[in-house]
Amino acid sequence: MSFLSTLRSFFIADDRPKISDVSPTAENRNSTPFEVSMSADGWLGIGDIGIQSTSGVFVSRRRALTVPAIWSAVDTISKTLASLPFGIFRETEYGSEKAKGHPLYNIIRITPAPDLQLYNAYSFRYGLFMQACFGDAFVKIHRNGIGRPTNLELLNSEDVTVWQKPNGQPYYTVTRNVGGVSKFETLLPYEVLHIKGLTIDGIAGENVTTIHRDSIGTSIAAEQYGNFFFANGANPSGALVFPQELKKEQRDAAEKKISGKFGGVRNVGKTMVLDAGAKYEKFSLNPQEASLNDTRNFQVNQASRIFGVPVPLLAQMDKATLNNMETMGIQFVTLCLRPWAVQVEQEFAVKLLTQTELYSETYFFRFNFAGLLRGDTTARASYYKQALGGPSTGIGWMSVNEIRELENLDRVDDGDEVFTAEKMQASQNPAMAEPADTTEDPEDMTDTEDPEEPTNDTENGTPQASRKRAN
């Protein structure tokens, strides 16, 4: 054992297996991996080709994003979670506070890969959730000599394959195409942050583009149909009928002439001149087919079901009202965003904290969903009013300084008190408040004049003695 390994054992005690114990050999692999990122002949980039759907369209992650409803759903989830405040906190006897002195603080809050200089915290989390929406997201953890994380590198999920040892322990192989050369790397569970979508076994997420390839394929096919439909003049229009039979050369020449002069959106409305007794017979066309409204609605509804984003948030407002918009906004946070946030908080804690920090529950990671209210001043003010509490709003749970910190304002004196149940009870029953102390301080008696001592006060020019204190 090397000196660094010996030193590391004093700081982090664990039984993590060595790389050599899980090398990607036939003895410790399953017969089929959870996700294959290479084709059988070894060519990389099969993820961009995709898998064929029933409609005949090949579906991959990138091709799925060509559907506007899917793009909007994935973008909405990713940018919302990436924009929320997220960091590491420390428990204290007064609650929790930002762990600004922890080695992970700047990595989580500012730049996840300071040595690699890859991205800022927002871009990192955006890419993490974007990939997770399609099944799996992987982050390689770079560590120093004592096991502390120093860089978080976001991996392309299409380059990662999940395997299992005979004892069931998972590990990961990463295939990178660097300068035209394939490079392979084996990573253990403690070296990878793994965020999963819907999962059956808890080890790997289900690939959305594989499970829903027919639904997504139909949406892609509908987009292509609409493109070709309008590219041909929004009009499969009709047929030229000639009184006599045409030779193949004549028919080809007529088709080329008509398509060149009258095909396409830019040629709509041009006047057609026919000769040789030709007649143009227009086909009947259903206006609903021309508008493709039903197909567009179908795409949005399917994307909403797959990714859990309410339909109005995908910019389809035909059935939105003020009442159901508020309800669907709450559903979006509780049923869609919060499960992702909880998984990330737990995965970061398990993989990035030391064993002592993890099991003592001294440090933890947390998303602050109050950040969702920043864009709405009225909602933010109403929330803060309830949080402060008062005789008219009830018991509070935040102090003035906590709210000022959320608003990036300086702290104020006497701003750390919370409106508790005792204060609420006292405000409702003033008689229960502590009575004022009316006992006179004995020291104040020193300034009182002696009853028998004469004074210089005069009444009608005659000196008068001080009046005695009434008993």
Image: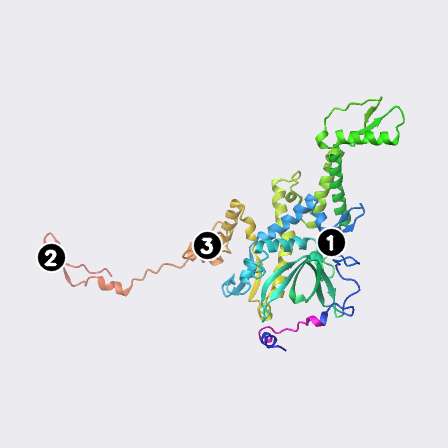
Q: Which residue shows up at 22% across the image and 62% down it?
A: 447
- Residue designated by label 3: 400
Instruction: Classify residue 288 by image quadrant.
Output: top right
Quadrant where the C terminus sits is: bottom left
Quadrant where the N terminus sits is: bottom right
- Contact? badges 2 and 1 (CB < 8 Å): no
Please state which amino acid type lies under the numbered disc 2: Pro
Kindly state the secondary structure of the residue where label 2 is placed.
strand
- Residue designated by label 1: 47
- Residue designated by label 2: 463
Quick check: 363 above or below 11?
above
Upstream in the sequence, badge 2 or badge 3?
Answer: 3
Magenta residues? 9-20
- Contact? badges 3 and 1 (CB < 8 Å): no
- Which colour scheme appears in the figure? rainbow
Quick check: 276 above or below 180?
above
What is the crowding at mark 3: few (fewer than 14 residues within 10 Å), some, or many (at least 20)? some
Q: Which mark is residue 85?
A: none
Mark 2 and mark 1: Cα distance apart in space: 112 Å
Instruction: Classify residue 115 by image quadrant.
Output: bottom right
Measured as percent of width and height from the top left, residue 111 is found at 56, 58
